[in-house]
């Protein structure tokens, strides 16, 4: 029967069923703490190396509100810096992407130029020009004293560009990811990859809810075509496997595309060493998703904007060596599933939008169940439990009482 207020708000017994207090998704103080304790401390992929194809190409983004710029130098090395001028802390570059090869109205070719006072920096982050330096600073300030704030940057796992704000991080990207991506490592790294699709969504929902949707498959009932064409014993038998540092892998499955109305088999086009039509999904803590499905690789990168808003960037990747025909096929296969008007993606985004509505900052705490146990298969919520165990370790907060609020007594 329906419950009254006391019954509705009574905390379930965490020894009987796992659950989270919804304030981990809505509390602004918790969100700010996440940025400091997690997002500023770990490796975050920010783009793909093919988006910086030539020397002087750049891309801008943010990590935990810090503006970042990544660029390719003439030595072919990709470097990352704070997108902040050391003079008056202005943004150096406002464009989302482009090239410094040609000059701007404020500065010379092959340099990053702050439009505010025309200070210039090279692709190694060195200051190479201070306007009217001698007149204003005499001999008290030299360009060698005011370079950009460099950030640790590595290219790994299929050419993703990883950046960390943590100068004192003790592990490499490969150490951080560990063996979580081993199941697709050979297909990712045997040949160079290239981005062929990009779009982004800004969703009024907490970033962790997007992770949850990628981590569990119990929600596949929301996908109409999955329900009517895709379910079989092999589908439900896939395992959810946990790895160090909060990462989760959903086991492989051969998708029967020829059973989907309007679809064809994808067995003729795949990735090196990947069996035809196979599907792998890997979630990397705190919010990165590799989704390799037959002929197309989708990588989701998340930028948390507030407790109730997240930007999700979706990239489709194929082989750099693709023929024109193969590339068009990959684009079609990717976008019929995951494009802005694709078969699956909009349903996932609508689902977490609904969660965002009910868990906005200021709403009363709710009990969010993580308690399904189904032999560690895809409808088992082991992946979510593993993620939030890691989250609680980083945050130092218990999942079912993150603000140490006295529990509501269970109704009799």
Image (tube, rainbow, N blue to C red):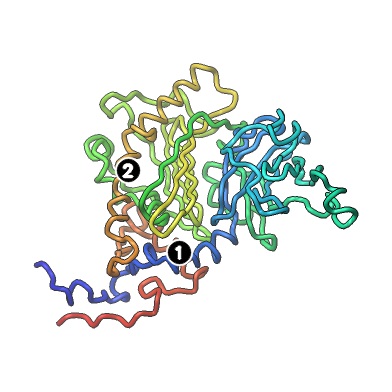
Q: Are marks 2 and 1 in contact (CB under 8 Å)?
A: no
Q: Quadrant of the C terminus?
A: bottom left
x 48%, y 31%: residue: 197
Disc ID at residue 332 = none
**Above or below, comparing residue 234 to residue 366 in the picture:** above
Q: Nearer the viewer, residue 266 or 133?
A: 133
Q: Residue at x 22, y 74 (%)?
A: 9
Residue 174 image point, x, y percent: 63, 51
Residue sitting nearer the eye, 347 or 122 = 122
Q: Quadrant of residue 160?
A: top right
- Which circle marks residue 31 in the picture? 1
Quarter-of-image position of residue 374:
bottom left
> Which circle, 2 or 1, is nearer the viewer?
1
Callout 2 secondary element? helix
* Point 32% across, 38% down: residue: 344
In this rendering, position of residue 369 left or right of residue 158: left
What is the distance, in whole Å, between disc 2 and disc 1 at their CAs?
A: 35 Å
Image location (x, y in percent) of residue 293: 43, 36
Residue under numbered circle 2: 235
Foreground of the two, 159 or 100: 100
Residue 29 coordinates in the image, percent (x, y): 44, 69
Relative to 225, 150 lies left or right: right
- Evaluate whether residue 172 shows in this view: yes
Looking at the picture, does residue 363 appear above or below residue 213? below
| Image quarter hosting the N terminus | bottom left
Q: Taking 371 as reference, is 72 left or right? A: right
> Residue 283: image x %, image y %?
47, 51
Task: Kindly give the residue lying farthest to the left in the view shown.
Answer: 1
* Location of residue 53 with respect to 77 vertically, above or below: above
Q: Can residue 178 be seen here?
A: no
């Amino acid at each position: 029967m329906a419950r009254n207020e006391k019954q509705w708000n009574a905390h379930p017994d965490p020894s009987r069923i796992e659950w989270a207090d919804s304030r981990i998704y809505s509390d602004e103080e918790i969100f700010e703490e996440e940025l400091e304790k997690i997002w500023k401390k770990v490796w975050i992929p920010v783009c793909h190396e093919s988006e910086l194809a030539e020397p002087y190409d750049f891309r801008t983004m943010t990590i935990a509100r810090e503006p970042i710029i990544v660029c390719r130098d003439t030595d072919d090395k990709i470097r990352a810096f704070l997108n902040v001028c050391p003079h008056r802390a202005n943004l150096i570059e406002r464009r989302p992407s482009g090239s410094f090869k040609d000059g701007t109205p404020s500065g010379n070719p092959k340099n990053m130029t702050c439009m505010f006072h025309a200070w210039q920096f090279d692709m190694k982050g060195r200051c190479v020009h201070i306007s009217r330096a001698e007149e204003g600073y005499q001999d008290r300030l030299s360009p060698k004293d005011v370079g950009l704030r460099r950030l640790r940057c590595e290219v790994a796992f299929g050419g993703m560009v990883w950046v960390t704000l943590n100068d004192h991080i003790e592990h490499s990207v490969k150490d951080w990811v560990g063996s979580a991506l081993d199941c697709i490592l050979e297909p990712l790294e045997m040949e160079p990859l290239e981005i062929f699709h990009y779009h982004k969504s800004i969703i009024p929902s907490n970033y962790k809810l997007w992770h949850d949707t990628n981590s569990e498959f119990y929600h596949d009932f929301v996908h109409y075509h999955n329900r009517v064409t895709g379910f079989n014993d092999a589908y439900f038998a896939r395992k959810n496997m946990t790895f160090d540092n909060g990462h989760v892998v959903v086991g492989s499955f051969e998708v029967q595309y020829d059973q989907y109305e309007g679809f064809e088999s994808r067995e003729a086009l795949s990735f090196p060493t990947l069996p035809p039509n196979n599907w792998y999904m890997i979630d990397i803590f705190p919010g990165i998703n590799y989704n390799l499905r037959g002929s197309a690789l989708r990588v989701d990168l998340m930028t948390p904007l507030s407790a109730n808003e997240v930007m999700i960037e979706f990239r489709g990747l194929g082989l750099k060596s693709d023929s024109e025909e193969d590339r068009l096929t990959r684009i079609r296969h990717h976008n019929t599933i995951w494009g802005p008007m694709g078969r699956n993606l909009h349903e996932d985004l609508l689902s977490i939008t609904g969660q965002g509505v009910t868990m906005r900052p200021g709403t009363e705490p709710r009990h969010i169940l993580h308690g399904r146990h189904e032999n560690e298969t895809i409808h088992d919520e082991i992946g979510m439990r593993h993620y939030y165990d890691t989250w609680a370790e980083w945050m130092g907060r218990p999942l079912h009482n993150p603000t140490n609020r006295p529990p509501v007594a269970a109704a009799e």
